[in-house]
Amino acid sequence: KAVLAAHHRIPFYVAIPLSTIDWHLRSGGEIPIEERAADEVLGAWGCVRASASRRRRGSGAGGEPAYVRIANPTSDARNPGFDVTPARLVTGIITPAGIFRPRELWRNRGPLGGPE
């Protein structure tokens, strides 16, 4: 989204809770990113319909909940829990204490709960 916003000269803002700022990191590149399970993006949960012969016997049309792989059986995937938007693409960071440009966060760390 940030890349498209920059391409079209649309301001891009990020809203964050103060608890997500790690004052000990020098850049977003140092943020550890959680790797989530690949099956979250390789398939989906849903109701699998019963066969036509079972439905006629009164099993209903709802089906049974099941995980259905939608990706190629030999495909694998990375599934990061989030990504880090480069500061150069961010117009402002919206916090409960106000809106700051990325480079203004450290200067305003006092009101933002950072170290003195």
Image (spheres, helix red, strand yellow):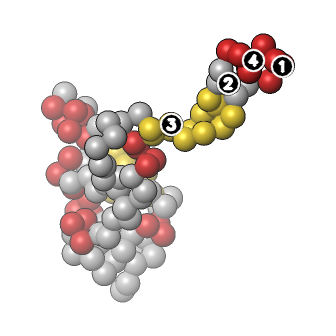
* Amino acid tagged 3: Val
**Circles 2 and 4: CB atoms closer than 8 Å:** yes
* Label 1 – label 4 distance at C-alpha: 5 Å
**Distance of mark 2 from mark 1, alpha carbons?**
10 Å
Q: Amino acid at mark 1?
A: Gly
Identify the amino acid type marked 4: Arg
Q: Which mark is residue 50?
A: 2
Query: Which percent across, then down, holds residue 91?
Result: 26, 46
Q: Could you give the CA–CA distance between mark 2 and mark 4, rounded to whole angstroms?
A: 6 Å
State whether residue 25 is above or below residue 105. below
Q: Nearer the viewer, mark 1 or mark 3?
A: 1
Label 2 neighbour load within 10 Å: few <14, some 14-19, many 20+? some
- Give me the C-alpha separation between circle 1 and circle 3: 24 Å
Q: Secondary structure at mark 4?
A: helix
- Is label 1 in contact with label 4 (beta carbons under 8 Å)? yes
Circle 2: residue type: Ala
Residue underneath mark 4: 55
- In this view, the residue farthest toward the right is 58
Label 3 sits on residue: 68
Q: Nearer the viewer, residue 7 or 30?
A: 30
SS for tag 1? helix
